[in-house]
Structure formats: C-alpha cells, structure tokens
Image: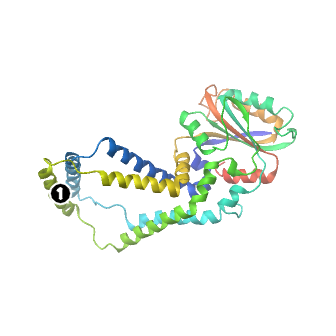
Amino acid sequence: MALIYVAALPVPLLCPQLNLCIGLPSIQFSADLSGALALNASLTVSPPTAAIYLSASIETSVLLGLSVTLGLPTVSFTASVSANIEASFNLSLSLLLDFELGLSLSAFLSVSIGAYAFTYEGVGSGLGATLTTELATTWPDGAPTSGACNAIIFGAVSPIAQTQIALFLNGLGFAPGLVAQAKLSALAQLSVVTAKAETQAQAAIQAKALAQAQVTAALGASVSIPLPSATLTALAKFQANLEADLALAPPKISAALSATASIAANIQASAGFMAQLGLAMGRYDAEFFCYTYSGTGSGLGAAVTSALASTWGDGTTPSTDECACVVLATTDGFSASVLASFFGGL
C-alpha cells in the first residue's frame, strides 16, 4: 500500500489537457465577460467627463513623448503573436475532437466509469480517521473494501483554493465532516461546469479562431506602423479640442452603456458556461495538495492519517488548519485510467 504526495497544483496544471482544450479559451471568455460587466458598472456609477478624457490624453502624451526620446516602438503586438494565439484556438478545436483515449471531449466526459467520491470539510489531520471509519468494511454501495483500489486525494487549504475546488468539481456537495457522494458513472457528474462548457465550445472557440485569423491577416498586411512622433502630433490636436470643449456638457454615455451591456449579454448567451469554467480554472494561485494511493480500500484511511499527521505534503503547511478535500476512488483499471487521463498532471 502506498500513498504518494505528487505536488501542490492549480486546476490548469492538474488538468493540462483540459486546459489546452477548453480551459484557456474559457479563461479568456471569463475575462471578456468580467471586463464588460466592470466597464458597464463603472460607466453607470461614474460617467466619464471631458476632464477625465483630457487627463488620460495628457498621461498618454507624456508616455509617447518619452518613447520618442528613447526611440521605443509603440506596437508590440505583431502578426506572429496573433498567429500564436490563433494556433492556440485551433489546437483547442482539434482537441475537442480527439481529447483522450481516442475519444472526443464530449465522449470522454460521458464514458461509463465507476468511481466512489467523498468530500470533507474540517481539519486536515482528521481526514484519515473519518475515512478509516467510513471504509472499515465496505464502500458506500456495499462492495467490500478489502480489495485493491486506486485513489486520488485533493486538499484545499487556502480560502481561494477551497473556493476553486468547489467551483471546478461542482458536481459534488461539500458539508462539514466526511460526505459520501453518489457513485460517479461519468466524469460529467464530477465537473458539471466542464460538461456544460463543452456544449458551447465548438462554436465559441471557432468564432474566436476566425476573429483572430482576421487580426493576423490585418497585421500581416500592414506596410507601415505610425511612429510615436506622428501619434503624438495627432494626440496633441485631440487634446486641444478637448480643452476647448471642457465648458460643454459631459459626453453622452448611453451608447457606451448599451455597447458594454450588449457585449456581456452576447458572451452570456453564446459562452456563458465557458466563462463559468474560466472562472473555475483561471486562478493559478489556488493550489491543491494532490496525492495518489494504491492499496486496499480499508487501508486508505490509515495511510492518510500517517501522511497528514502534522503537515501537508509540502512539509510546512500545517494539517491542523481547516480545509476542503475531495477523495476519488476506483476499483477497476479502466475507471482509474479515465480519472488519470482527466487529472493528467498527477
């Protein structure tokens, strides 16, 4: 019997294939949605005035003037950068059709498995004892725990990690103590947000890829880039006009409000589930302590008790603090291989 500490991993590194497939586009959709909502809210609360525009233009003038003095380029987003982004979207599209085990992402999330799932809230050092009691003789469905099993354990200690594990593995319910979940028959039941995002992925990512291709083509066709001095001259004229208009009424913002609201509504309609997945996968600072186990089901609790006697796997984070944990266990090789493919960072 062996319990092995793997590493402290955020969701994108825990599920690298999923991250490449729909994680990265979903994070972008989440950022787009958050940005549109934040901009709409800021326009509503604090409408821009000519003075604000003037202040921004003066700041830009200073930066451009500095770039003229130092000879700095004003355009860093090149056709090659855009082409790399475009390639990332195209990779995502190809992985949708061939994700793992020769299956598309949709088929992979729906393939039949059998996995016991448990959630736990409490001090980390108490997880092992509750597992020992729960798995003393049988699994929740009555199958004996004396046979071999493979298990994956995630421990979320920081507040943000606890939030993210619940957002990503949102097919599970969390409550104080050890909670035995319904036996999982497909990965879609484990991460409902992933399954929902997959239904929108093909069309949403395709639209992103086509739009990025247009950007790449436009950048590649450019024959000249405005120099900082030319931009500075144009900005000076704009600044002069703003100074002359300061006595006038603030600019109308109804068009801006309508535009930002429309952007947010369109993202919600076409890629709302992907934006939710992006929210669940977008925090690289939310790390889970990850372990794998191979041995009898009845021996899992004792192995966890020993490993979490005083600290988590990094050797420094105390296991006496509150945490949220997920335990996934399988008793057949195929189910174990499906979980291992999904959590490819382990």
**Rendered-image quadrant of the N terminus:** top right
How is colour applied across the structure in the image? rainbow
Amino acid tagged 1: Phe
Q: Is residue 71 left or right of residue 186?
A: left
- Let me know if residue 240 appears in the view: yes
Can you tell which quarter of the image residue 211 is in?
bottom left
Q: Is residue 216 left or right of residue 60?
A: right
Q: Is residue 279 above or below residue 297?
A: below
Q: Residue at x 32, y 46 (%)?
A: 43
Where does the image place residue 243, in percent across and percent down from the top left? Answer: 13, 50
Where does the image place residue 198, in percent across and percent down from the top left? Answer: 61, 57
Mark 1 crowdedness (10 Å alpha carbons): few <14, some 14-19, many ≥20:
few
Q: Secondary structure at mark 1?
A: helix
- Let me know if residue 123 appears in the view: no
Q: Is residue 190 left or right of residue 250?
A: right
194 or 20: which is nearer to us?
Answer: 194
Where does the image place residue 33, in percent across and percent down from the top left? Answer: 45, 51
12 or 25: which is nearer to us?
Answer: 25
Q: Residue at x 59, y 66 (%)?
A: 94
Can you tell which quarter of the image residue 146 is in?
top right
Figure disc tally: 1
Q: Is residue 94 left or right of residue 235?
A: right
Q: Is residue 79 above or below residue 266?
A: below
293 or 59: which is nearer to us?
Answer: 59
Q: Circle 1 is placed at which residue position?
A: 238
